[in-house]
Image (tube, grey):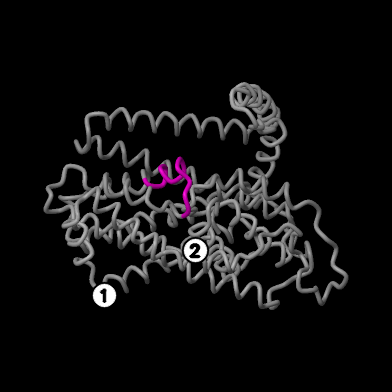
Amino acid sequence: MGTVSDPSGQDPVAAGFAAAEAEGPAPTPANDTEPPEDAGLPKDRPKGIGRRIVSGFLSYGVIILVVYYLFEDLAGAATTQAAFAAITVAQVALFAALGVVNLATNWPPIAIALPGLRIREAAVTNTASAALSNTVPEGGAVATGLNFAMLRSWGFPLSDITSEVVVTGTWSQMTKYLLLALSLVAVFLQGWGPEWIGWAALAVCVLYAVAVVVLAMILRSQALAERLGRLSDRVWGWLTGLVRHRQAPNLVESLPKFRAMMVALLAVCWGRLTTAMLISQLTAAAVLGVACRVQGLDQSTISWAVILVAWGGATLASLIIPVPGGIGVAEVVLTAILGFGLPASDQAAVLAAVILYRLATFLVPIPIGLVSYLYWRKSQAWRRPVDSRRVHLTPQPSS
């Protein structure tokens, strides 16, 4: 599911609320034991998903050519050719396997945040959503709709699905930017980077601290969430009033809903969810680190702190510039950060490392996701009656 590691740049929390509002009330099945083929599926579920994924996959020849010529412009033809020449068949196989491992680390947070969901179900919905978000414009929003359709067909109620999307989306973003803030501080202390890196580290740390404080205040008080929603609506109303045909969000209602979803779920799983999310995000960064190491870029050349900065910077850039899978944006950011200050002789290795990383995190999920989607559409083995897997969360008593 795209909420844990969403390469499209789509805001998973906003997409979760939008999908929940679009679905409307759940249909009532005619038979509790033999649900019809479309039982539990929203009427406005995404259509033609398989065709979209196949179309996107077939367009990769064009995408690869575009990225190839982009690299040639940035690094030079000789460097680009040397980078591709440095990649061996064994490395391709290794990073295809690492791509599967990286995908698998996304599944435990989803299962934790949606009690009753099996890991294999989390795998199907996550991989299908990832494939869609990597291949379709605005794929993050469409992938969220697909994710809702899958989980509804397996009997989960709309409220529980929305809570899972909101909580995992929030926890994913908070984890990513915590790692980015810490890594920026680390590289500043190491003396790496341009002169303004210290100010960048300070800005990210301050913004992250403000986000943590605001989130904690919202979770602590319903009344405060309502007041903050009213204040935010006034500010957003003024800002969106400057741009025609833009509708301000109704945060006075959304923030209290957001709080209710977060509090109920985090009360029973915040520790396990935090641990699983850290493992998931660190695994993605580790894949980038392994790519650097297999290309001969050791700790003295590119430190792990710099690798984390590159990974976090690419994530942030993909959020600001939402293109499918961050294609083009992520490659430029990764190459620029990892190659900063290195001699020309190391630039081909940097580029090769970026290519291997993108193979694992961008290309590998697509065929896997297509198979997952086709299995979900063709098989009724996991179908359940609508709302039959509602979970009543009860916090565990403290010992």
Q: Is residue 73 visible?
A: yes
Q: Residue at x 66, y 64 (%)?
A: 150
Magenta-colored span:
314-324
Closer-to-camera residue (397/45): 45
Confirm whether the magenta stretch covers residue 319: yes
Q: Which mark is first along the chain, 2 or 1?
A: 2
Closer-to-camera residue (165/76): 76
Confirm whether the magenta stretch covers residue 321: yes
Whole-percent x, y for residue 276 in the image: 48, 56
Q: Residue at x 25, y 49 (%)?
A: 73
Q: Residue at x 24, y 56 (%)?
A: 351
Q: Amino acid at mark 1?
A: Val
Label 2 Cα neighbours within 10 Å, binned few <14 / some 14-19 / many ≥20:
many
Where does label 1 land, which residue? 89
Q: In what quadrant of the picture does the N terminus appear?
A: bottom right
Circle on res. 239 = none
Q: Residue at x 27, y 46 (%)?
A: 305
Q: Quadrant of residue 243?
A: top right
Closer-to-camera residue (205/245): 245
**223, above or below 15, in the image:** above
> Is mark 1 in CB contact (under 8 Å) with mark 2?
no
Q: Amino acid at mark 2?
A: Gly
Whole-angstrom CA distance, mark 1 to mark 2, is 24 Å
